[in-house]
Image (cartoon, grey):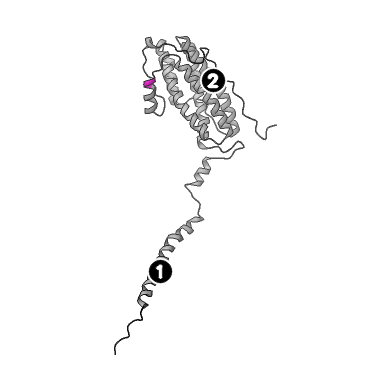
């Protein structure tokens, strides 16, 4: 007696069942791990980001904001003494006036910076870092037109670096006190850049190469022939007028 052949369609349904079973298994393998991780904390993602940004009455304060506040303080700690050296040792009126700009500008900006740091709880350094001390030592040992060259070259390169940082912070910060400080820093740095360029010792070609090549100012500024250093009156006038006086940040909500 011959075995009965399978009913028509039984093999088809059996194969279809296997396919469906395989697809279901694949779905479970893909989806279940997602469910199992959905409720787990992200130890390297959002937690780290939230730790870097803190809430303040003036808006979120990011790691970049805190770094900016610290760098404004550090800039004043060496650029203000550098300005005092230029007032004393500069061989031209333009160099001495550039020094005065640094002293006046960083005196006001540092006061503003310390107020902001105090209200936002950001600790500040009280001495220049090692690199800045080296730059100051270079200026202290230089004499005559060599001092003028070193002063204009080092300070213009440093201000070029800071100018880019100020713009980046001003464009992205969510903190109102940091925005005010960035506005003040922008005006101050731009004023210093113009005064330094007015000394006639800035080699713009070498400056562009140095700004592109190194992340921080180097100890040797561009070489300019002292005989070719011709003071240039900046616009709009030769009076080197300073930016408007710094306005104090608004009082905190809990102040009397």
Region rendered in magenta: 202-206
Query: Which numbered disc, 2 or 1, marks the residue that appears first in the sequence?
Result: 1
For mark 2, give the secondary structure: helix
Question: Secondary structure under badge 1?
Answer: helix
Residue 105 tag number:
2
**The N terminus is located in which quarter?**
bottom left
Q: Nearer the viewer, residue 18 or 236?
A: 236
Is 203 covered by the magenta stretch? yes
Place residue 54 in its image quadrant.
top right
Q: Which residue is mark 1?
A: 20
* Of labels 2 and 1, the one closer to you: 1
Mark 1 crowdedness (10 Å alpha carbons): few <14, some 14-19, many ≥20: few
Disc number for residue 165: none
Q: Main secondary structure of the magenta part?
A: helix
Q: Residue at x 52, y 31 (%)?
A: 170
Q: Position of residue 163 (x, y in %)?
A: 47, 26
Which residue is painted at 38% across and 11% down in the image? 228
Count neighbours of disc 2 (C-alpha within 10 A) and say few if under 14, some if 14 to 19, many if 20 or more: many
Q: Residue furthest left?
A: 2
Q: Residue furthest front?
A: 8
Q: Position of residue 61 (x, y in %)?
A: 55, 37
19 to 79, vertically: above or below: below
Q: Is residue 19 placed above or below 62 in the rendered structure?
A: below
Residue 91, above or below 34? above
């Amino acid at each position: 007696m011959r075995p009965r052949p399978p009913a028509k369609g039984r093999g088809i349904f059996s194969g279809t069942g296997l396919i469906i079973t395989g697809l279901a298994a694949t779905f479970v393998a893909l989806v279940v791990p997602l469910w199992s991780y959905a409720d787990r904390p992200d130890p390297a993602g959002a937690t780290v980001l939230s730790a870097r940004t803190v809430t303040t009455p003036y808006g979120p304060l990011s790691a970049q904001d805190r770094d900016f506040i610290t760098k404004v303080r550090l800039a004043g700690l060496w650029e203000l003494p550098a300005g005092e050296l230029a007032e004393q040792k500069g061989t031209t009126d333009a160099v001495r006036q550039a020094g005065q700009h640094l002293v006046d500008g960083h005196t006001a900006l540092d006061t503003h910076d310390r107020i902001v740091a105090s209200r936002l709880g950001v600790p500040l350094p009280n001495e220049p870092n090692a690199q800045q001390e080296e730059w100051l030592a270079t200026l202290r040992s230089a004499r005559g037109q060599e001092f003028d060259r070193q002063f204009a070259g080092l300070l213009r390169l440093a201000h070029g670096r800071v100018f880019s940082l100020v713009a980046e912070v001003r464009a992205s910060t969510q903190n109102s006190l940091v925005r005010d400080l960035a506005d003040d820093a922008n005006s101050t740095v731009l004023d210093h850049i113009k005064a330094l360029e007015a000394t006639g010792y800035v080699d713009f070609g070498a400056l562009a190469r140095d700004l592109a090549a190194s992340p921080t100012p180097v100890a040797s500024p561009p070489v300019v022939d002292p005989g070719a250093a011709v003071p240039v009156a900046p616009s709009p006038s030769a009076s080197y007028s300073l930016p408007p006086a710094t306005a104090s940040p608004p009082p905190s909500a809990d102040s009397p």
